Amino acid sequence: MNFVEAQQDMRRAYYDGATGVIVSATVWLIAALVAWQSAPRNAIGALLIGGMFIFPLSVALSRLLGRSGVHSKENPLSPLATTGTLWMLLVIPLAYGVSLHKIEWFFPAMMLIIGGRYLTFARLYGLRTYYFLGAVLCVAGIALVVLKVPTPMSAFAGAVVEYIFAFLIFLKAKSGARAAV
């Protein structure tokens, strides 16, 4: 399997990754609602606990939409997906540590972490859209800190960005349009 075939296999299996983005956006929205109704620490817990279910729920959604939700065992990009996930998990404690100094910085820090993860998705799926998603999340995370945005709105911003990009990725996947990397 060559590089382009590996990317096609990933796109085919996971609906161009759109299912993961929409599930992630939903987790961000739940965290925003928890922050709105409760303490910010509870919203942090909601994002972290909800985050554990993003991949299995995105696989289920991919299957519901007629995709396999499983890439080929021979796919050479599989280690990239695993490595990106491990890196993200190793950096999340940094976001939590930042929140101990200033609670309002947790969600912007997570936007930077997840934005960085999406940058690897550009290669994983062969779609430039993920460069833009990653960049928008990173810029938004920095802007939220500079503007001193309250916790519920920061979490809501993460949800909005991901919902917008999930919609765009779904549209491209349905039309078959590709902005290859």
Image (spheres, rainbow, N blue to C red):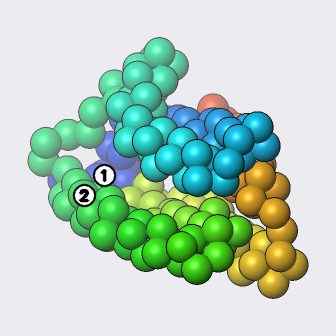
Where is residue 71 drawn, in percent x and y? 26, 39
Distance (Cα) linking label 1 and label 2? 19 Å
Q: Which residue is mark 2?
A: 82
Q: List the residue tagged with mark 1.
A: 5
Residue 143, percent from left and from top: 79, 78
Indicate the quadrant where residue 137 lies: bottom right
Check contact, mark 1 vs mark 2: CB within 8 A.
no
- Image location of residue 57, percent across then percent down: 43, 29
Q: What is the quadrant of residue 99 in the picture?
A: bottom right
Side of 20 where 179 appears, left or right: right
Secondary structure, mark 1, is helix
Where is residue 78 drawn, in percent x and y?
22, 54
Mark 1 or mark 2, earlier in chain: 1
Circle 2 — which element? helix
* Dot 1 amino acid type: Glu
Q: Residue at x 48, y 39 (%)?
A: 50
Q: Residue at x 38, y 59 (%)?
A: 124
Q: Which mark is residue 75?
A: none
Residue at far bottom of view: 146
Label 1 neighbourhood size at 10 Å, few (<14), some (14-19), many (20+)?
few
Seen in the picture, residue 81 relative to 66 is either above or below; the reply is below
Say which amino acid is labelled 2.
Thr
